[in-house]
Amino acid sequence: MNREEFLEFVSKNFNIGGDAMRLIDNILQYAERIVDLDERREFLNDTLMGTIGLTEEEVAKISL
């Protein structure tokens, strides 16, 4: 999923407000700047897993 698709997925499947959605979008935008794919994946896992109930499999579907 690209950034927009992932945000739509989160919006449809998790009960979070606008502030949290903006924060997640900011995290994804920052992650897009990380060139090394392993480092990007580690960053996304560290910042998104456990915050709203995302699983490692769901985070792994993000393709930035």
Image: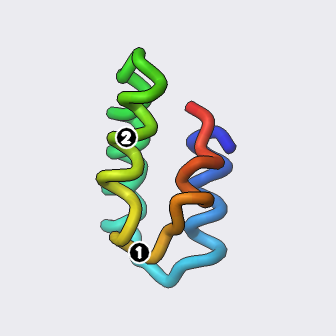
Q: Position of residue 51 (x, y in %)?
A: 34, 70
Residue 12: which quarter of the image? bottom right
Which badge, 1 or 2, comes first in the chain's sequence? 2
Disc 2 residue type?
Glu
- At x 58%, y 69%, the residue is 11
Q: Position of residue 24 (x, y in %)?
A: 39, 55
Q: Which residue is mark 1?
A: 52
The colour scheme of the drawn protein is rainbow
Helix, strand or loop at mark 2: helix
Q: Which residue is mark 2?
A: 42
Left or right: residue 16 compared with residue 20? right
Left or right: residue 55 compared with residue 52? right
- At x 34%, y 45%, the residue is 27
Helix, strand or loop at mark 1: loop
Disc 1 residue type?
Ile
Vertical relation: 62 (above or below) 31: below
Quadrant the C terminus occupies: top right
Left or right: residue 49 compared with residue 14? left
Q: Residues within 10 Å of mark 1 (few under 14, many from 20)?
A: few
Q: Position of residue 49 (x, y in %)?
A: 40, 63
**Labels 1 and 2 touching (C-beta < 8 A):** no
Total marks placed: 2
The label number, if any, that marks residue 29 in the structure image: none
Vertical relation: 55 (above or below) 63: below
Q: Residues within 10 Å of mark 2 (few under 14, many from 20)?
A: few
- At x 58%, y 48%, the residue is 60
Vertical relation: 9 (above or below) 47: below
Residue 40: which quarter of the image? top left
Front one among 17 and 64:
64
Residue 17: which quarter of the image? bottom left
Front one among 44 and 56:
56
Quadrant the N terminus occupies: top right
